[in-house]
Image: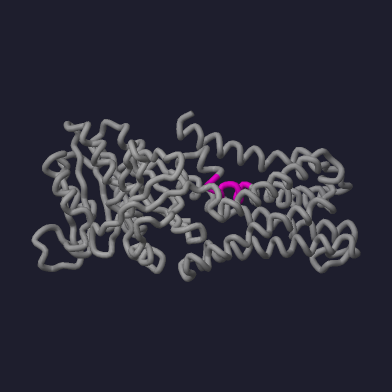
């Protein structure tokens, strides 16, 4: 099945399973007002719960990443659902309260109605508070939090799901009176299994063990780490990335596979010191054990299948996914290929000698763009649409674009290319994040 069909099938499955529980709701209330309150309350409870289940599954790369190669698209879908799922879930407390006030004269949000009711209502309130915490920290204040803090808060959602099922199973009338209750129990059991599996995966149990065999400097504060598998090797395709963990308990971070040896299974990742974790990786030594999870991603997959001329745009360490693509392009000597590579200063260029070789041997037109060196004789400033026009003979709409670099650079270039009429299907980017 093609990537496009898999994406369509996944979206279809999400929509279908989110809507399906409403088929079990019994609309037997005596007034229209109660019917409306009940319908909206059940929509928030049942449909919203299913979307939260999907949120859990989509955020679990060890599962969804095996079926869907485009992991970054999946994570994007995960973020989109997260923005709106809570709004749907919020229908439940609002309209179930109106329902109980109208029919029974009690307010469950104030824990009225007896201990048999309010105990489970309280569990639902705690679950809702946890989900709200995740949404607020992910959507509104993410930029102010370091990755470790944000990720720890994000994991709070996994406490919310068991509370949600503990809240709904004993008091949800639709679950108690229809076959949906048995389905809900099965879903709860499945999630319990996934929670255990995710816990073990987070400990690195399902990652592939490798041993570092070489570490070499390839630029200022940039190290290429070569590791050899201890067991079945990976087979990363062009432009794919892996999650890299130093030791069994170290933090996990995504890095492009910058080189792969099919004979030995050796995998290289190239790491620039951009923070505490990546700076620590500069001191890794041969003989150390590392754990790799992957490979993931479809960067360059569509572009390399196209017959259009190719424009590659890299910023800083974003040059790494293009190294393997250079090797593939050697088999297409007649194809028009350009590389625009942006850095702050000339000495920060990574793999400089290799870039000289691809320009002379593989006939790739390389343009360096330096932003913070007023004495640099070449192109200065930033990579822009106007700069690219100086070097491209065709209309921009006739090229495939591959972009990898800082998020700000990537977003600005995508917007600029789109405003020039380049179809979204011809613009491909890679951004690594949790």
Q: Is residue 152 above or below residue 403?
A: below
Frontmost residue, 125 versus 150: 150
Residue 155 versus residue 412: which sits nearer the camera? Answer: 155
Toward the front, the furthest residue is: 287
Magenta range is: 54-62
Query: Farthest residue toward the top?
Result: 1
Q: Is residue 39 left or right of residue 371?
A: right
Q: How many marks?
A: 0
* Residue 128 percent location from the top left of the image: 69, 61
- Residue 408: within the magenta? no
Residue 415 seen in this snapshot? no
Kindly identify the residue that appears in the image at 35 percent across and 46 percent down. 267
Residue 325: name its quadrant: top left
Q: Nearer the viewer, residue 350 or 383?
A: 350
Coordinates of residue 377 in the picture (x, y in percent): 8, 61
Q: Is residue 164 above or below residue 115?
A: above
Estimate the x, y position of residue 355 in percent, counting from the top left.
Answer: 18, 49
Q: Residue 364, can we see it? A: yes
Question: In the figure, is residue 114 to the left or right of 186?
Answer: right
Above or below, 402 relative to 344: above
* Magenta highlight: main SS: helix
- Could you tell me which residue is drawn at 45 percent across and 47 percent down? 72
Residue name at image x 64 percent, y 37 percent: 16
The residue at the point 14 percent across, 45 percent down is 357
Indicate the colouring scheme.
one colour
Extreme residue in the left direction: 377
- Magenta-drawn stretch contains 55: yes
Across and down, in percent, residue 106 comes to 87, 64
């Amino acid at each position: 099945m093609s990537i496009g069909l898999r994406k369509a099938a996944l979206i279809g499955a999400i929509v279908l399973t989110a809507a399906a529980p409403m088929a079990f709701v019994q609309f037997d209330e005596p007034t229209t007002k109660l019917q409306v309150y009940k319908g909206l309350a059940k929509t928030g409870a049942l449909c919203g719960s299913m979307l939260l289940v999907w949120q859990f599954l989509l955020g679990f790369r060890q599962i969804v990443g095996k079926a869907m190669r485009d992991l970054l698209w999946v994570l994007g879908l995960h973020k989109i659902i997260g923005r709106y799922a809570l709004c749907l879930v919020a229908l439940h407390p609002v309209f179930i309260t109106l329902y109980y006030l109208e029919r029974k004269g009690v307010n469950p949000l104030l824990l009225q109605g007896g201990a048999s009711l309010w105990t489970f209502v309280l569990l639902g309130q705690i679950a809702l508070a946890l989900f709200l915490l995740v949404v607020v920290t992910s959507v509104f204040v993410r930029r102010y939090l370091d990755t470790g803090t944000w990720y720890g808060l994000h994991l709070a959602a996994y406490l919310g799901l068991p509370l949600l099922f503990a809240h709904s199973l004993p008091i949800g009338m639709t679950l108690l009176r229809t076959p949906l209750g048995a389905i809900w129990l099965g879903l709860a059991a499945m999630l319990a299994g996934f929670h255990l599996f995710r816990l073990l995966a987070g400990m690195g149990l399902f990652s592939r063990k490798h041993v570092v065999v070489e570490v070499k400097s390839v630029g200022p504060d940039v190290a290429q780490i070569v590791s050899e598998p201890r067991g079945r090797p990976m087979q990363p395709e062009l432009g794919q990335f892996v999650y890299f963990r130093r030791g069994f308990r170290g933090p996990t971070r995504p890095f492009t596979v910058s080189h792969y040896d099919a004979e030995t299974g050796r995998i290289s990742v190239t790491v620039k010191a951009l923070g505490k974790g990546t700076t620590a990786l500069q001191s890794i030594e041969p003989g150390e054990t590392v754990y790799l999870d992957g490979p993931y991603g479809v960067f360059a997959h569509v572009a390399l299948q196209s017959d259009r001329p190719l424009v590659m745009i890299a910023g800083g360490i974003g040059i790494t996914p293009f190294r393997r693509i250079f090797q593939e392009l050697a088999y297409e000597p007649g194809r028009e290929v350009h590389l625009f590579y942006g850095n702050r200063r000339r000495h920060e260029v990574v793999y400089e000698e290799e870039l000289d070789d691809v320009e002379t041997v593989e006939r790739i037109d390389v343009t360096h763009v330096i932003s913070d060196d007023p004495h640099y004789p070449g192109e200065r400033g930033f990579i822009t649409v106007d700069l690219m026009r100086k070097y491209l003979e065709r209309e921009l709409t006739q090229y495939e674009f591959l972009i990898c670099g800082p998020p700000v650079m990537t977003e600005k270039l995508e917007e600029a290319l789109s405003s020039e009429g380049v179809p979204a299907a011809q613009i491909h980017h890679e951004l690594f994040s949790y």
